Amino acid sequence: MAKINPLLILPPVLLAGFVAFVAVGNLREDRDVLPSARAGHPAPVVALEEMPGRPLFTDGMLRTGDVTLVNFFASWCPPCRAEHPLLEDLAQDGVTILGVNYRDQPHLAEAFLDDLGDPYTAIGADPRARMGLDWGVVGLPETFVVDGAGNVVMRHAGPLTDEVIETRLRPAMQRAAGIN
């Protein structure tokens, strides 16, 4: 009987493993949802630069006992512009939204907020993306739900939509507030 070279078996085994890995990834409940390594853990430290004329988003604002949203945005980001009216609606409904202006020019961010409105209770600039890196931001916009103790409950990558707000954001905010 001829011996089979063990190296000939390796490529099909590796291919089968890769196919299984991809298949399992595609079986996730919602492929558009990016899990956050921060969920269930304390929010990273907030270290932002001041934006003139606007209240500065500080670390203590995440530990007030109230559920908050942390929204990373930039003036150069078209999806940020698209979701902005929904942030305005949430703010009008009494939701506390803390803004992080990410890798942006301060004067462009000011013009963006002056033009579209300012839904943020407080805001800060992250021009070098240091805070974004700590929070695991991979693209803009990204929104995090943080409970009153300062723990990240949920992350949404991409623009908010009415559907995302009703099916993911509001339920996460209710869970964070202890409302089932």
Image (cartoon, rainbow, N blue to C red):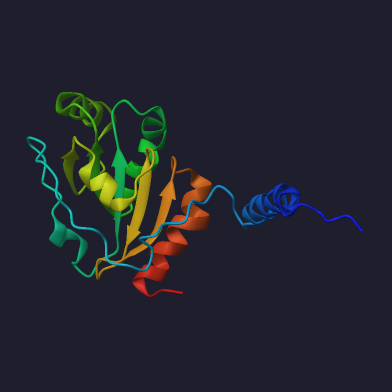
Residue positioned 70% across, 51% down in the render: 10
How many marks the image carries: the answer is 0
Residue positioned 47% across, 56% down in the render: 35
Question: Where in the figure is residue 133, as x and y percent of width and height?
Answer: 28, 46
Q: Quarter of the image for the N terminus: give it.
A: bottom right
Question: Where in the figure is residue 161, as x and y percent of width and height?
Answer: 48, 43
Question: Where in the figure is residue 29, as x and y percent of width and height?
Answer: 62, 58
Q: Quadrant of residue 147?
A: bottom left
Of residues 163 and 42, the one nearer the viewer is: 42
Note whether 61 is above or below 78 in the view shown.
Answer: below
Of residues 92 and 16, the one nearer the viewer is: 16
Residue positioned 43% across, 63% down in the render: 172
Left/right placement of residue 12 relative to residue 165 reads right
Residue positioned 67% across, 51% down in the render: 14
Of residues 96 and 41, the one nearer the viewer is: 41
Q: Quadrant of residue 6?
A: bottom right
Note whether 86 is above or below 153 in the view shown.
Answer: above
Q: Quadrant of residue 54?
A: top left
Question: Where in the figure is residue 143, as x and y percent of width and height?
Answer: 36, 49
Left/right placement of residue 57 relative to residue 98 reads left
Left/right placement of residue 105 relative to residue 86 reads left
Note whether 109 is above or below 45 in the view shown.
Answer: above
